Amino acid sequence: MESFFTAANAVVPFICYMSYGYLIRHLGFGDETFYKRLNQIIFKAFFPLMMFNSLYNSKADFQTNTRLALTAVVILLLAILLTVLLTPLFVKGNPQRGVVAQATWRSNTLMFALPLAISMYGDEAGSLASIVIACCVPIYNIAAVFILEYFRRTEGEKTSAVKMLRNILTNPLIIGAIAGLLFRGLHIPLPACILKPIKSISDMTSPLAIFICGATLVLPDIRKNIKLITICTVLKLVVLPAIVTTICYLLGFRGIELFILFSLYATPLANAIFPMSQSMGGDGELAGEMLAISTVSSMFTIFLWIIALNSIGVF
C-alpha cells in the first residue's frame, strides 16, 4: 500500500496541474492562441535550461554499474528502432506518426521512475536509478527530436539528411543538453547567483508544461483518437513493461536492478512529448491527450504491477 501512495504522490500533482490548466482556460483566462504562444516559450526558453540544469548537476558515475546501464540503453534503442519501423505501417499521417513513434517508450523517468525506485529500495536504488536515467534521458530527447524531424516532412517528400541534422542540432533541447555536458565535462564552475535562477526556472518547467497541456486539452475530442490512444496506452503501461521485465529477469537481473529497469517502461509518458510535438510539426492535440490518459492510467497500472510482481516474488 505504501508503494501505491508513492505512485499517487508522483502522479496526482500532474493531474492537479492539468486540471488547473483546463479549469483556467474554461474560465476564460486566455484563448487557444495565447496558450500555444506560451507553449512555444516553454519549449524554446524553459526546457533548454531544464536540460542544462539536469546534466550540469548530475552526480551519476558512468564508470560503475556498466551492465545495468548498458542493458537499459540497448533495450531502449531496440524499442525506438522497432517503433520507427512499425509505426508507418499502422498509422496514417506524419503528424500522428511522430507522436505514436514515441508513445510506447518515452517515459517520465525523473518524476516517476526515480521516486518509485527510492520508495521501494531506498537511497541505494536512487543512486543506481540516477545513473541509468542519466544514460537514457539524452537518448529519449535526441531520438524524439530525430523522429519528429523525420516525420515533419510531407507525404512523399524526400528528407534532406543535412537539413534534418541542422534542425536537430539547433533544437532547444539539444542545445541545452550539449551545453550542460560541456560545462560538466570541462568542469566550468558557475556561481550560485547563476545556478540558483537556472534551477528555479528548471523547477517551473514541468508544472508549466503540464498546466498548458491541460489548458489546451479538449476532452470531447479524445473520442476522435480513442482507438489510437487506447492501443498506445496499453502498449506503454502494460505490454512493454511485461516484455522488458521478462527479458531482464531471464538475463539475471533481480531486486533493485530489475525494479529500475521495470520502472523505466511502466511509468507514463514524459511531459515533454506535448510541447515538443506541438512545436515540431507533430499532432500536439494527440500528444496532449495521450499524456493525459497515460498519466491518469499509470496511477492504477503501476500499483497493480507492483502488487502482482511482489506476489510472485519477482521484486
Image (cartoon, grey):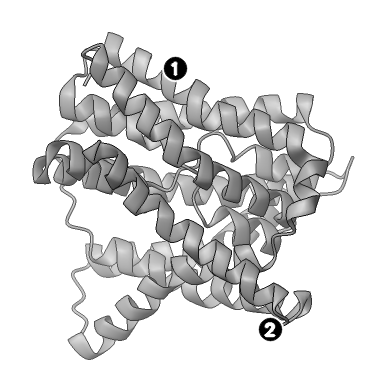
Q: Secondary structure at mark 2?
A: loop
Instruction: Please identify the residue farthest to the right as the structure is shown.
Output: 156
Q: Residue at (77%, 24%) from the top-left corner?
A: 89
Q: Amino acid at mark 1?
A: Ile
Residue at 41% x, 74% y: name it. 204
Please name the amino acid that badge 2 sits on: Phe
The residue drawn where x is 51% and y is 72% is 208
Quadrant location of residue 301?
top left
**Above/below status of 264 relative to 10:** above
Where residue 64 appears, x then y in whole percent? 13, 38
Give the labeled residue for mark 2: 29
Closer to us: 164 or 251: 251
Q: Earlier in the sequence, mark 2 or mark 1?
A: 2
In the picture provided, is 190 more to the left or to the right than 222? left
Residue at mark 2 to residue at mark 1: CA–CA distance: 44 Å
In the rendered image, is residue 155 in sight? Answer: yes
Residue situated in front as seen by the camera: 106 or 218 = 218
Q: Would you call the spot at circle 2 few (<14 residues within 10 Å), some (14-19), or many (20 or more)? A: few
Residue at (76, 30) in percent of width and height: 88
Residue 213 at x, y = what percent? 61, 63
The answer to whether any part of residue 62 appears in the image is: no
Can you identify the residue that label 1 sits on?
243
Callout 1 secondary element:
helix
Dot in front, 2 or 1 = 2
Quarter holding residue 135: top left
